[in-house]
Image (cartoon, grey):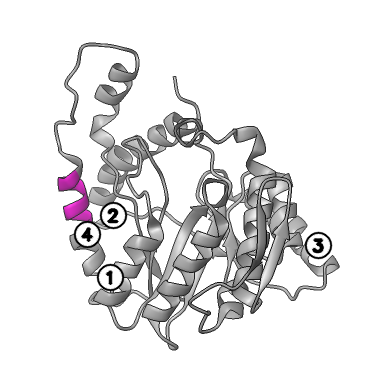
Amino acid sequence: MRVGIGMHFSNSGDWDRFEARERGADVPGLPAVPDWVVLAEDMQIAELTEELGFDSLWSVEHHVTPYQMAPNPLQFLTYMAGRTSRIDLGTMVVVLPWYQPLRLAEQAVFLQQVLGEERALRLGVGRGLGRREYAAFGVDMAESRPRFQETLDIVTLALTRDRFSYDGQIFTIPETEMRPHPRDGQRIVDNMCCAWGSLKSVASAAENGLRPLLLPLRPREEYCAELAEYHRIRAGRGYQPTKPTVVLWAYCAPNESDAEVAAERYLSRYVDTVSLIQNPK
């Protein structure tokens, strides 16, 4: 088993101020704990990943709320690629409907180049659930599925073809040669994984040959049933079986009782923020 850590860059204590300001209340314009302080502290943790013996480092993508302040996971991971020498890097996830696909493919290729031949980029992708984020980008959330599929199609073409073109419902790309050429674009495609939140997304991941990336949002039993359906569809498309990457929440402490108390305090607060990002009041 290979074990990594994921960075979230959360300013969870700012939610009350943030939501009050959204409602038009007369509250301070900036959080009590500045965002840059949160980022600096989490960057220090990220720097310990390799030293502490972990196998990989992962980053989320979120925008415009205190939930998780990680607006460009590939930018962060490219920096960390230069700061480390052994670990793999991954995204959990890049939200495809928010991207111009050719630019995303270029960023992935550049990161793979910095990583070199021995280390892997595990590009996790998804559709995203944050209504505030879709609104801020001016992207219609009702278009998330076709945007996801077209972006995935174009990224795959850019990574695996010398030249390509695309004529879709949303994106039209003339005959184009991406530069720099990938060191091994097929390797990026083969390592791509997908987080899902519905049976339609399960089918999409399986049909596109994406590996499973399971985020801890629902009971384990639901994921077991979805994985069975995923593998049924995947086999029907001629893909070989594959193991999921599983994200787990953990809290480390000197003993079990201390860990239980602290985890209940901090992880329960995080669970509350998950509902806020998906269903703004």
Tag 2 or tag 4, which sits nearer the N-term?
4
* Residue wearing tag 4: 43
Tag 3 or tag 1, which sits nearer the N-term?
1
Q: Secondary structure at mark 4?
A: helix
Spatial distance from mark 3 to mark 2, Cα to Cα?
39 Å
Q: How many numbered tags mark residues here?
A: 4
Residue at left offset 39%, top offset 68%: 4
Give the position of the C terminus as an image quadrant: top left
The stretch of residues the image draws in magenta is 36-42
* Residue wearing tag 2: 256
Tag 3 or tag 4, which sits nearer the N-term?
4
At label 2, counting other C-alpha atoms closer than 10 Å, the crowd grade (few under 14, some 14-19, many 20 or more) is: few
Say what amino acid the circle numbered 1 marks. Thr
> Residue 191 at x, y = what percent?
57, 73
Spatial distance from mark 4 to mark 2, Cα to Cα?
27 Å
Say what amino acid the circle numbered 2 marks. Glu
Residue at left offset 64%, top offset 59%: 152
> Residue 38 at x, y = what percent?
20, 47
Write down the quadrant of residue 224 in the picture: bottom right
> Residue 86 at x, y = what percent?
33, 83
